[in-house]
Amino acid sequence: ETLQKDKGKTRISVMSRHTKNDGITPVSYMFDEHIPDLAPNLKDIGAYYGKEISFEELINNYKVKLNEKNIKEKVKALATRAILEDIIIMCVEKSAQECHRYYLAKECKKYEPNLEIIHR
């Protein structure tokens, strides 16, 4: 399966790794840029997929990460950039509401309140 590039939109992967959930199938062909620092911590991702922590715990840990100084700066930069150009933040999860990218988008909106967020 391939995705066609959305014209005029930059597709940014916010995954820690470039494989589907099987850990084998690459997905690097699906995006233009990769910002792995905006993914949840690898330890938390592994614990979530291993059913050791809940989605709520994963997201709570991710929200803590989003408040780290160096990560805040990257989120602010992404938010500012999203005001100037159309950006699609991507991950392998099918539903944005059941993925960290939903919370990343909400965090971006804190820095750029006029940012329009469309969840697909």
Image: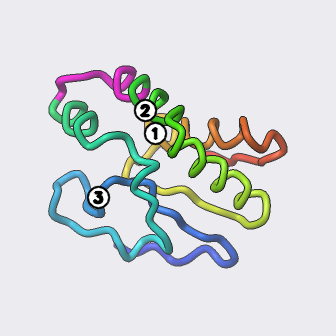
Q: Nearer the viewer, residue 48 or 110?
A: 110
Q: Which amino acid does the dot numbered 3 rest on? A: Arg
**Residue furthest toward the front?**
69
Which residue matches tag 3? 17
Q: Which amino acid does the dot numbered 2 rest on? A: Tyr
Residue 108 x/y as whole percent = 66, 43
**Residue span colored magenta:** 51-59
Judge from the rendering whether residue 27 lies leftward or rightward of residue 86; answer left or right.
Answer: left
Q: Is 92 colored magenta in this rendering?
A: no
Residue 28 x/y as whole percent = 35, 72
Judge from the rendering whether residue 101 lies leftward or rightward of residue 53; answer left or right.
Answer: right
User: Vertical placement of 43 versus 76: above or below?
Assistant: above
Judge from the rendering whether residue 5 lies leftward or rightward of residue 114; answer left or right.
Answer: left
Q: Which amino acid does the dot numbered 1 rest on? A: His
Which residue matches tag 2? 62
The alpha-carbon separation of the residues under discs 2 and 1 comes to: 7 Å
User: Vertical placement of 63 versus 94: above or below?
Assistant: above
The alpha-carbon separation of the residues under discs 2 and 3 comes to: 16 Å
Whichever of labels 2 and 1 marks the residue nearer the N terminus, that label is 2
